[in-house]
Amino acid sequence: MSIAQNLLDIKASLPENVTLVAVSKTKPVTDLMEAYHAGQRIFGENKIQEMTEKWQQMPKDIEWHMIGHVQSNKVKYMVPYVKLIHGVDSLKLLKEINRQAVRWRKNINCLLQIHIAEEETKFGLDETELDELLNSEELKEMQNIKIVGLMGMATFTDNVQQIEKEFKYLKSLFDKYQQPTTNNRQLTTLSMGMSGDYQLAIDCGSNMVRIGSSIFGTR
Ligand SMILES: *Cc1c(COP(=O)(O)O)cnc(C)c1O
């Protein structure tokens, strides 16, 4: 099956309120362009250097999402063009994103990554840290960033009940922090679900799915 066909099939299966991020990491520009010509405009990458190279070569109406872990010292390279950063998991990182956004006179949308998996290795905030971050005074001062939602990755397992429990937990946090809404905090996006689990994620309340291998093939 072609990339275009994979993409169209997946899009046709998504409810209208669910946004598709085509995860194109490690794939060549020719593959991304095939998806582009089939109508895809949102691409997700997990390495800044790779995203920058693709951004330079590709049409400028693409929305680039950073889905990987971000190091503070690399933020400056992507702020000029990144639309949404999915993996924000500290106030320190948020500060740096805001600092660079001010420099570039940009507004950057961010999702806070929540640790929902059992694995120790996955990044993200726990509930207490999320609470602290969302209620911190410093956040209110950051005028050039906006926290627009939450992101999470479930445990890598065949145990559907386990994954469902984790997705439902993330949805409950998303619901819990709907209020209050401030200038730079308005949780509308819940980014959860990848190739293997996006249908379940949508059933659990996701409205943004990050799909790579089901579109572009295995990496
Ligand atoms: C690679 C990646 C995806 C996509 O994974 P697939 O299983 O290929 O769909 C989604 N989210 C993140 C954070 C990733 O790193």
Image (tube, helix red, strand yellow):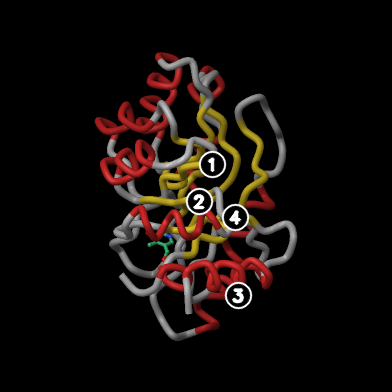
Mark drawn on residue 200: 3
Q: CA distance from mark 1 to mark 4?
A: 38 Å
Circles 2 and 4: CB atoms closer than 8 Å: no
Distance from Cα at disc 2 to Cα at disc 3: 22 Å
Q: CA distance from mark 2 to mark 4?
A: 37 Å
Label 2 or label 3, whichever lies nearer to me, is 3
Place of residue 156 in the rendered image (x, y in percent of width and height, measured from the top left): 39, 75
Among the two numbered marks 3 and 1 on one chain, the one whose residue lies closer to the N terminus: 1
Asked whether disc 2 touches disc 1, contact meaning CB atoms under 8 Å apart, the reply is: yes
Residue 140, image quadrant: top right
- For disc 2, the neighbor class at 10 Å (few under 14, some 14 to 19, many from 20) is some
- Distance (Cα) linking label 3 and label 1: 26 Å
What's the residue type where badge 3 is placed? Leu
Discs 4, 3 touching: Cβ within 8 Å: no
- The residue beneath circle 4 is 39
Of circles 3 and 1, the one toward us is 3
- Mark before the other along the chain sequence, 4 or 3: 4
Q: Position of residue 103 (x, y in %)?
A: 40, 14
Q: Give the residue type that dot 4 points to.
A: Gly
Label 1 belongs to which residue? 131
Residue 215's disc is none
* Distance CA(mark 2)–CA(mark 1): 6 Å
Q: Which residue is mark 2?
A: 127
The residue sitting at 65% across, 42% down in the picture is: 187
